[in-house]
Image (cartoon, rainbow, N blue to C red):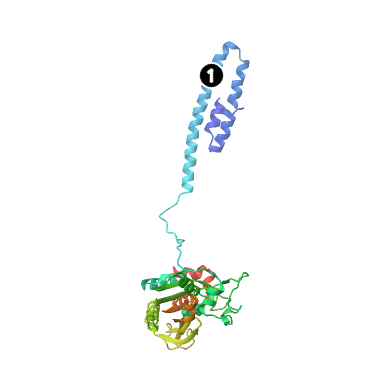
Amino acid sequence: MQALVEKITQCNTLKDLEAVRIEIFGKKGVLAQEFAKMKSVPNEEKKAFAQELNRQKSQLTSLFDEKLEVLSKEAKEQTMREEAVDVTLYSPLKVSGALHPVNETMNRMIDYFVSMNFTIEDGPFIEDDFHNFEALNLPVYHPARDMQDTFFLNDGHLLRTHTSPVQIRTMLSQKPPIRMIAPGSVFRRDFDLTHTPMFHQIEGLVVEEGDGVSFSHLKFILEDFLRTMFGDVAVRFRPSFFPFTEPSTEVDISCIFCEGTGCRVCSHTGWLEILGAGMVDSNVFKAVGYENVSGYAFGLGIERIAMLLHQIPDLRSMFEGDLRLLEQFR
Ligand code: PHE
């Protein structure tokens, strides 16, 4: 008996105690074996034998329970000590996300046009020839249809090469007056310092019944937009050509790096080319069944603006997901 008591009291871990429990209280343990001896005890001694055995059993049981409680408590305290977290410690690893410079720039543009009462329209990335080219007065022989620029799919569809097909979709599904922008991804087969196969554009279209929309409306909105984006810059309209606008213009701002005196970014011209625009060509209105309307349209690349605003030299770096670049925009 004394040996069993010592076995229990000398346990230092829950694991040891569990082993002792099996040894003493288990199915084939010491106590079970003692009780088994009852059979061979003469009848008149059975009662005393059993009483003594039960006394010992309850003594051992309460000793065991006490020990179990002590060791459990110790084990718990040790885990608490080991897993303790000092919530007041300074953590230099606090990381928060940030908008990608393309999204941030796009949001600024959207904010401007929404404040000017433009609606936001959307269209599919996978387009057909009609919406991407035909209805935009891009005849079959136009070089923009060349395999060099367009990703064609096997079934005759293609990845939209600009956001202009959203003009067509919006005019086909709505009636004038229309005052919309369409921001989104576009795709072209091109890859170098200033071109990636996927980039973003924002398209604008304003159409009203009658001949009320004039080039001066276009000029006002673009000048106001560019000064909102770039601050106090000079804005220049150059004659240009797009199949879907007539007359067409390309719009430049005075270089924001050298203020027009000439530097590497503006190729020493003093000007930065920013967007394309013009009065909607009558052939486009014909393609969507509009009569007796007038309107203007414009389109620009978002990455180019983001690169200028954040002085990012290589367009490709925008889409590499390198945290060293992205973390700078937090
Ligand atoms: N879609 C033209 C492009 O991708 C941009 C543009 C849009 C020009 C609308 C004029 C009017 O370059």
Q: Which of 124 and 95 is in front in this view?
A: 124
Label 1 beta carbon within 8 A of ligand 1: no
Residue 35 % position (x, y): 59, 21
Identify the residue position indicated by label 1 in the image: 52
Q: Which quadrant is the C terminus positioned in? A: bottom left
One can see residue 263 in this view: no
Residue 206 % position (x, y): 41, 76
Q: In this view, does 219 lie above or below 88?
A: below
Q: In the picture, residue 257 is in which quadrant?
A: bottom left
Q: Which quadrant is the N terminus positioned in? A: top right
Q: Is 324 positioned to the left or the right of 36 in the image?
A: left
- Residue at 48%, 44% (x, y): give it: 78
Question: Could you say whether the residue bearing mark 1 is in a helix, strand or loop?
Answer: helix
- Residue type (three-letter) at the residue carrying disc 1: Glu
Residue 269 % position (x, y): 46, 88
Residue with the most extreme top position: 44
Residue 212 % position (x, y): 37, 80
Q: Which of 47 and 278 is in front in this view?
A: 278
One can see residue 123 in this view: yes
Q: Nearer the viewer, residue 151 or 34?
A: 151
